[in-house]
Image: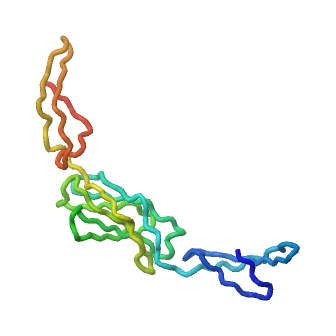
Amino acid sequence: PEVINGRTHKATVVDLSPWVEYEFRVVASNSVGIGEPSRPSALLRTKAAVPVVAPTNISGGGGSRSELVITWEPVSEELQNGEGFGYIIMFRPLGSTTWTKAVVASVESSKYVYRNESITPLSPFEVKVGVYNNEGEGTLSSISIVYSGEDEPQMAPAGASAQSVSAAAVEVSWQPIPWNRHTGRVLGYEVRGW
């Protein structure tokens, strides 16, 4: 810290974090060296302020049909800046101009699930997550694209054919289902025989 003139008996400490408890000590110095520190002051908490750090790693996806799952990295306690801390979730379908807003009042939360039967499977949404406390609303994250939950594939594979390979084996082949919003990500196929 900056050295204060020996005739001064008061100082203002700046650049402290809001809503954090501090204690202070004073050390005297001269041309010979530095003396012993004083006893610590009583703990003093700085005043609360609106939070200024937005959540990071905004992502999500997955979930069930008709769900939009949004996840984020929680803001650490020392950056919450006051009591009554929570998260503001804002989202809209890609291309829409109207935001839907939700509030999550839990400090520990890192996930929000929006359920609505009108959500089309694998629809892209613009998402941003912000913070608030008793002092007001703080910063919002930048926009991330998150996809709604998938539905089961709505198409059957085409061109199924079978060819005998041996007395005990048959090779079955088919055309893969192309990826699109209605089929989702095909993770595998099931081959049935009778």
Residue found farthest to the right: 32
Residue 138: x and y in percent read 42, 74
Q: Quadrant of the N terminus?
A: bottom right
Residue found farthest to the front: 31
Quarter where residue 31 is shown: bottom right
The residue sitting at 27% across, 55% down in the picture is 147
Residue nearest the viewer, comparing 4 with 156: 4
Residue 48: x and y in percent read 52, 79
In the image: residue 168, left or right of residue 143: left
The residue sitting at 75% across, 87% down in the picture is 9
Q: In which quarter of the image is the C terminus?
A: top left
Residue nearest the viewer, comparing 181 with 39: 181
Quarter where residue 189 is shown: top left
Residue 109: x and y in percent read 41, 63
Q: Which colour scheme is used?
A: rainbow
The residue sitting at 23% across, 71% down in the picture is 98
The residue sitting at 37% across, 68% down in the picture is 104
In the image: residue 83, left or right of residue 23: left
Residue 168: x and y in percent read 20, 14
Quarter where residue 6 is shown: bottom right
Is 158 above or below relative to 109? above
